[in-house]
Image (cartoon, coloured by chain):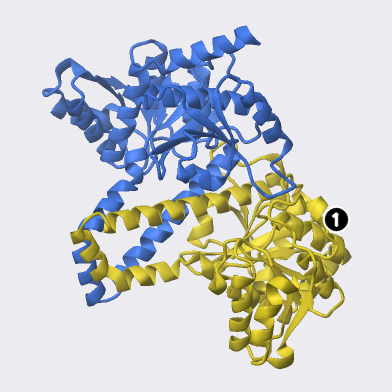
Chain colours: A yellow, B blue
Amino acid sequence: MGGDHGPSVTVPAALAFLKADATANVILVGRPDAVQAQFEAARGGFGERLRFQPASEVVGMDDPPAIAMRNKKDSSMRVAIDLVKAGTASAAISAGNTGALMAISRFVLKTLPGIDRPAIATVLPTLKGRVYVLDLGANVDCSPEHLLQFGIMGSMLVSTVEHLDNPSVGLLNIGEEDIKGNEVVKEAGELLKSSGLNFFGNVEGNDIYMGTTDVVVCDGFVGNVALKTSEGLAQMLATFLREEFSRSVLTRMMALVALPALKRFKRRVDHRRYNGAALLGLKGVVIKSHGSADAYAFEQALRRAAEAAGNRLIERITDRMAVREMVA
Amino acid sequence: MGGDHGPSVTVPAALAFLKADATANVILVGRPDAVQAQFEAARGGFGERLRFQPASEVVGMDDPPAIAMRNKKDSSMRVAIDLVKAGTASAAISAGNTGALMAISRFVLKTLPGIDRPAIATVLPTLKGRVYVLDLGANVDCSPEHLLQFGIMGSMLVSTVEHLDNPSVGLLNIGEEDIKGNEVVKEAGELLKSSGLNFFGNVEGNDIYMGTTDVVVCDGFVGNVALKTSEGLAQMLATFLREEFSRSVLTRMMALVALPALKRFKRRVDHRRYNGAALLGLKGVVIKSHGSADAYAFEQALRRAAEAAGNRLIERITDRMAVREMVA
């Protein structure tokens, strides 16, 4: 139901996903008046692989998470997460209110043993491939122990969805001399060093896109600023590039000639390909799509959810945490 | 002397600066063996406007700031800042070790009345023009009062060098629901609200490049990450764009055709134009050039220093802080 576009995006995305993955099943959750007509029109093609689960309420993008959790017990978000809890669904995917999704997920699914706080992780393109960054805003004030747990969860996420054996983990810090990071980051570095993870050491902001490590760990405030700053910069650069190519008839002709190269460039950095942030540390797979996602972007979030659930993300994190408990 | 390229960049930049600004004077500070030959070759053209001040030592890029400050009392950095302290120079400009520059500046010049900690501010391009962001790494752990002082200094910097009457100030925060920033940021927002500054309110990372406000205030850890992340992203995008246009003979021809537009785009976002970060809150103008600056970039740092000193930046911050003390 959620996101800026609602079922007009999520339903076509679900159909495309079902077409592309013959082993997949989708349960559409939402208000019957909003979703059921589209569901009825599409169901013929997929039979039992496409189901509909009604929910009478919708969490608004501006609803305070605590209110959404307490007062909207039949929201599409809540019903979807209940399906994960019940084992009926392997993952819940939403383009709605992030805070509410996290609050409801945490309340319904609970956190995994040894995990104090769930975190939000996203994938980004780099010069060398891809990087997973967490936390992106779920946790503003983090202890060294929290950052260590983010490192473990990030590492397990990458090994699950990228099929990498021992992903490298970097700790986001700053390089100014004399003041190499604050106390929390320093202590987190010590914990990560002795964690058994493939800990690279400190990285700086530019290392995210250089692809220095497979995982970058930071607190949610810093991660959120890094991500949003990137979005702003990318948007500004795209605007400037467009403006320069539409300045005159001549530059518009240049753009036409250069179109194949420009298109390849655009496809390569298309943020829609990277849609689908994982809410990690919960007893279930929950994926958050960008609110402004279109059908293509939302389909990527569905694929990411299938990949995580199909490759036993939750079990991997659980096992890794259990090893840690035994060692400690 | 400093930076990655030393006098081979700083001397030509100084000459270009003198040529462009007939009212300007430059004192080259450095080891005679490294600088004097270039100085002698160039002096004829500028007479007394170009002087040379010998210094026997150089602060290395990896020297710990405390060591550089205590043990290298005749470093080019120290001598240049001493010239500001003595009133012989209106500003000091260095491409050297940031931590050492801050430590020596603070030790020699002292902070202005009412300023607890100096901050580093840089200018960045935005969709609407320019934005000044501070702090960029001088202060890792900030109190609400520090963030307020950054707001005051940033506002005065923009009014000085951009000739804006009442610059708008934004407080960098994150927008995730339920967890709108940490306690420090919340309290800083309250202080900024009642500061008499043109306080816009909270902004998010993307607002930096959207040009939502003229000034963006944050702690040094977050600011450093935002800046370095931007550098990494810009570098990755530039690499991808270059790769797509050099993929084949055909795409290279496309690039040739599109060159004028691509060049205009490149000029528009050329980070060299934005070189020259201000060390704010000191009793003197100190400007930090990027270590990798070329002559064009370093010349921009010189211009920025001249603009700040010529338009009485230090007096403006002092006056604004005095008003604050009276009100408090």
Q: Residue at x 65, y 75 (%)?
A: A302
Residue A303: which quarter of the image? bottom right
- The residue located at (64%, 79%) in the rendering is A14
**How far from the left and from the top, in percent, is residue A210?**
48, 60
Q: Residue at x 74, y 56 (%)?
A: A148
Across and down, in percent, residue B304 comes to: 34, 28
| Residue, far left | B44
Q: Which residue is mark 1?
A: A71
Which corner quadrant of the image does residue B222 belong to?
Answer: top right
Location of residue A49 (image quadrant): bottom right
Q: Nearer the viewer, residue B76 or B240?
A: B240
Quadrant the N terminus of chain A occupies: bottom right
User: In the figure, is residue A30 to the left or right of A166?
Assistant: right
Instruction: Judge left or right: residue B68 versus residue A249.
Output: right
Which residue is nearer to you in this view: B274 or A190? B274
Percent from the top left, x then y, of residue B320? 52, 14
The chain letter for the residue carrying disc 1 is: A
- Does the image show residue A15? yes
Image quadrant containing the C terminus of chain A: bottom right
Q: Circle 1 sits in a helix, a strand or a loop, which is it?
A: helix
